[in-house]
Amino acid sequence: MFDVIVVGGGPVGSYAAGELASRGHRVVVCERKNIIGEDVCCTGIIGSEAFSMLPLAQMVGGAIIREARAARLFSPSGRLVRVSKEEKQAYIVHRPVFDAGLARWAQGKGVEYLPGSEVRSVSFGGSSAVVEISGRATPLEAKVVVLACGFGSPLPQKLGMGTIGDFVVGAQCEIGIDGLNEVEVYFHRKLAPGFFAWLAPTFEGRALAGLLSRRNPGENSPGVTRGRI
Ligand SMILES: Cc1cc2nc3c(=O)[nH]c(=O)nc-3n(C[C@H](O)[C@H](O)[C@H](O)COP(=O)(O)OP(=O)(O)OC[C@H]3O[C@@H](n4cnc5c(N)ncnc54)[C@H](O)[C@@H]3O)c2cc1C
């Protein structure tokens, strides 16, 4: 029996798992995907304060693509406001590499990973929790289960934890672009109702173009990856 089963091998799951293992608990992470970080829909902009609060540079330093000190904000009428600071404000990380790096860090603390393991149900009996995994005949048991399954999983609702009433949906794709060195943010009711759209430079000549909105973000952006937060 494990001390803790973590459902979800995203950043939250891996970080929680690593912290718990470093306190001496026997921890396993069940991740639905076969490869940690695969098909993740995220721009990877992380405020520099997160890097000062957590030793992220040591944990996932290889995931950092660039630093950001400025951003260009475009109003609905196209007016540009540029904000900048001397000190770095954020890092743009490669999310698949970031997720894989956090998982490696957690494994280094002794966490076991079960990729390709979708948790179907969690039930409680006596002093342990029973976790059923699709395609696996024997369920796993643990004293504690951590749900770190991100947005959209039915598990929290199945366990009576309620539903998420307020959310935005996002769409994003990678594009080729020249001369983009700063993050650009676009506010426009038609483009991204209730939220905003962005261009985030990544590698030389490449950027992530995305938007979050309270309505279907894929309406005008076919062929993009989608996610929710
Ligand atoms: C378009 C877009 C852009 C974004 N850009 C940024 C950004 O620039 N900066 C930022 O900080 N945040 C950004 N976010 C938000 C960020 O992606 C999320 O906050 C973050 O991924 C949440 O991490 P998590 O570990 O909680 O969940 P996730 O990253 O969603 O990880 C959950 C994991 O659980 C797994 N899982 C789910 N159900 C099960 C199950 N039943 N069994 C096993 N495994 C399961 C999933 O496969 C997944 O790997 C963006 C989101 C979107 C949609």
Image (cartoon, grey):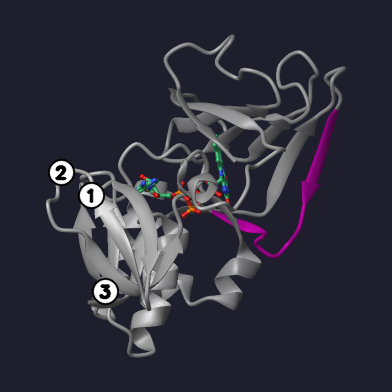
Mark 2 vs ligand 1: CB below 8 Å: no
Residue sitting nearer the eye, 136 or 208: 136
Amino acid identity at mark 1: Ser
Secondary structure category for the residue under label 1: loop
The x, y position of residue 98, in whole percent, is 39, 56
Q: Earlier in the sequence, mark 1 or mark 2?
A: 1
**Mark 2 — residue?**
135
Q: Which mark is residue 117?
A: 1
Q: Residue at x 67, y 59 (%)?
A: 89
Q: Earlier in the sequence, mark 2 or mark 3?
A: 3
The x, y position of residue 111, in whole percent, is 26, 74
Q: Earlier in the sequence, mark 3 or mark 1?
A: 3
Specify the quadrant of the image occupied by residue 140: bottom left
Mark 1 vs ligand 1: CB below 8 Å: yes
Stretch in magenta: 80-91
Residue 89 falls within the magenta-colored stretch = yes
1 and 2 marks in contact (CB < 8 Å): yes
Residue 189 appears anywhere in the view: yes
Secondary structure category for the residue under label 3: loop
**Mark 3 — residue?**
111
**Quadrant (top left, top right, bottom left, bottom right) of the C terminus:** top right
Amino acid identity at mark 2: Gly
**Quadrant (top left, top right, bottom left, bottom right) of the N terminus:** bottom left
Task: Tell me if mark 1 has few (under 14), some (14-19) or many (20+) residues whose alpha carbon lies within 10 angstroms of its own.
Answer: many
Specify whether 114 is left or right of 70: left
The x, y position of residue 157, in whole percent, is 54, 45
Residue sitting nearer the eye, 74 or 3: 3
Q: Residue furthest bottom?
A: 24
2 and 3 marks in contact (CB < 8 Å): no
Q: Residue at x 62, y 27 (%)?
A: 211
Against 13, residue 186 (above or below) is above
